[in-house]
Image: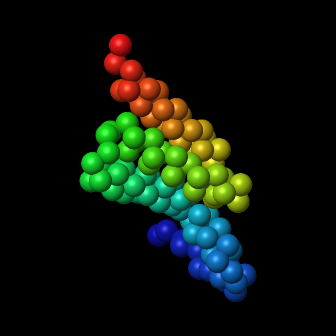
């Protein structure tokens, strides 16, 4: 039988403590949230009629702005932050290649 820890008074005293408790139970919680936000922002930009490269870059930059504070608070590992930075770089290179086909 799996033991599921129950929150105590100090785990629910503030929003930060509650988020740290949730992150301790499921370490992939915030990376999954960031991935969902990336997908949603990418789809929204594509629906606005933007090109794929601009949508990719916007979604990656938007997610990187959100993931930096989460990394500083310890909710997301630095590896995830680096991955989002690589996504931004790929989007910028894609935009450059799309605008200069020669």
Location of residue 94 with respect to 60 vertically, above or below: above
Residue sitting nearer the eye, 6 or 78 = 78
Relative to residue 63, is residue 81 drawn left or right?
A: right
Relative to residue 50, is residue 21 drawn left or right?
A: right
Q: Residue at x 36, y 26 (%)?
A: 98
Q: Residue at x 63, y 48 (%)?
A: 77
Q: Position of residue 11 (x, y in %)?
A: 67, 78
Q: Residue at x 65, y 44 (%)?
A: 78
Relative to residue 5, is residue 92 drawn left or right?
A: left
Quadrant housing residue 80: top right
Which image quadrant: the C terminus? top left
Judged from this view, the residue extending furthest toward the top is 102
Judged from this view, the residue extending furthest toward the bottom is 9
Q: Is residue 28 visible?
A: no
Q: Residue at x 71, y 54 (%)?
A: 72
Q: Position of residue 53 (x, y in %)?
A: 37, 36
Location of residue 7 with respect to 41 vertically, above or below: below
Q: Is residue 93 visible?
A: yes
């Amino acid at each position: 039988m799996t033991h599921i820890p129950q929150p105590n008074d100090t785990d629910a005293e503030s929003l930060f403590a509650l988020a740290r408790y949730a992150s301790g139970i499921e370490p992939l919680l915030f990376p999954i949230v960031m991935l969902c936000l990336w997908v949603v922002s990418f789809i929204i930009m594509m629906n606005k009629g933007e090109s794929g490269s601009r949508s990719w870059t916007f979604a990656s930059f938007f997610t990187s702005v959100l993931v930096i504070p989460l990394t500083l608070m310890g909710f997301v590992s630095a590896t995830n932050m680096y991955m989002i930075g690589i996504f931004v770089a790929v989007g910028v290179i894609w935009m450059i290649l799309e605008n200069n086909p020669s």
